Image: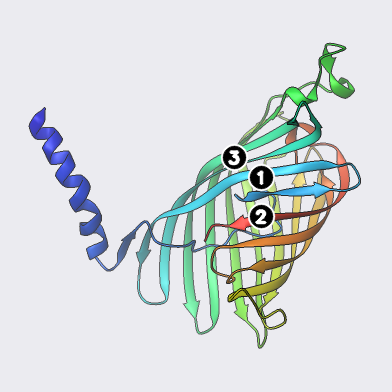
Amino acid sequence: MKNILNKLIILWFILPQAITSQQMLEFLPSGLQFMPLKANHQEARLGVLYFPRTGFLKVDIGNNVDLIKYYFNDSASLSSGIEFMAYALSTNYQGKRLQIDAIDGFFGGNANLQIKSGTAIYQLRLRVIHNSAHFVDGHYDNINDRWKDNIGPIPFTQDFGEITFAHTLKLSEARLRYYAGVAYATLVRPHLIKKYSFNAGFEISTGKITGKFLNRDTNIFIAHHNRYAGMPDYKLSYNNMLGIKFGGWYEKGIIFYLSHYHGNDIFSEYYARRITRIGAGFFVDFL
């Protein structure tokens, strides 16, 4: 047993150097090869979105980490990582704590292929994600001993794979990334949810207008995301964002933004409900 333990300790210290010494393979690379889609709510982030009309909050907790990266050559690479996240609907503040009505949780992994050609970047991302949704104690009426609005919890699950193609262009004073993708769920509950869904959108950003803040780059951006999904009938949902990032576009930073969302409720316990929400919020890029 002692010999095995000694070998494991030696391997623990030697393996990272052995991996990184091979210039084609990098263990725990810095940053993210595929930047999360800004206007897609199903991306890992840490932040809060406030809806002034109702006073509700969307609270995001999550992160996305690249664990390993393989370099085919100077212009092509393949990364792989994990992502864990959840976002919750806070509808009130009582007893000095947030009242959480509903929550969606996601966990899974991804693989990202990137090819550079001049100033252009081509990317292909594969995600495999488990998504489940739940009502929480903030949705329960303790006084009347029933679920609020007579809406009880449903078993909601989506286990899906998603492929997204993205193309980034360097314009004279800005960057443009546009993308499109398709997802297929191997398991859905309730069963009337369609298994295929489609997404597309774009992001355009520039650091030429706002300059620097406390010696850090700033970038203003516009982002638009569409999702066409059967929840239960196929309909289009979209999200528009206008924001500013303090920090380099491909570096960690904090983002303040305005959003306008229209479509099926992003909180999956209410998946069939069509809503329109305007909000203001912030989140952090862990890049």
Residue located farthest toward the bottom when viewing the structure as drawn: 172
Q: Which mark is residue 283?
A: 2
Residue located farthest toward the right when viewing the structure as drawn: 53
Query: What's the CA distance linking mark 3 and mark 2?
Result: 18 Å
Identify which amino acid the numbered label 2 is placed on. Phe
Dot 3: within a 10 Å radius of its alpha carbon, few (fewer than 14), some, or many (20 or more) residues? Answer: many
Q: Which mark is residue 106?
A: 3
Helix, strand or loop for disc 3: strand
Left or right placement of residue 273 versus residue 46 in this view: right
Q: Which residue is mark 1?
A: 60
Q: Quadrant of residue 40?
A: bottom right
Decide: is 187 above or below 121: above
Where, quadrant-wise, is the N terminus in this rendering?
Answer: top left
Dot 1: within a 10 Å radius of its alpha carbon, few (fewer than 14), some, or many (20 or more) residues? Answer: many
Query: What's the CA distance linking mark 3 and mark 1?
Result: 11 Å
**Tag 1–tag 2 contact (CB < 8 Å):** yes
Helix, strand or loop for disc 2: strand
| Residue 265 visible from this viewpoint | no
Q: Nearer the viewer, residue 230 or 29?
A: 29
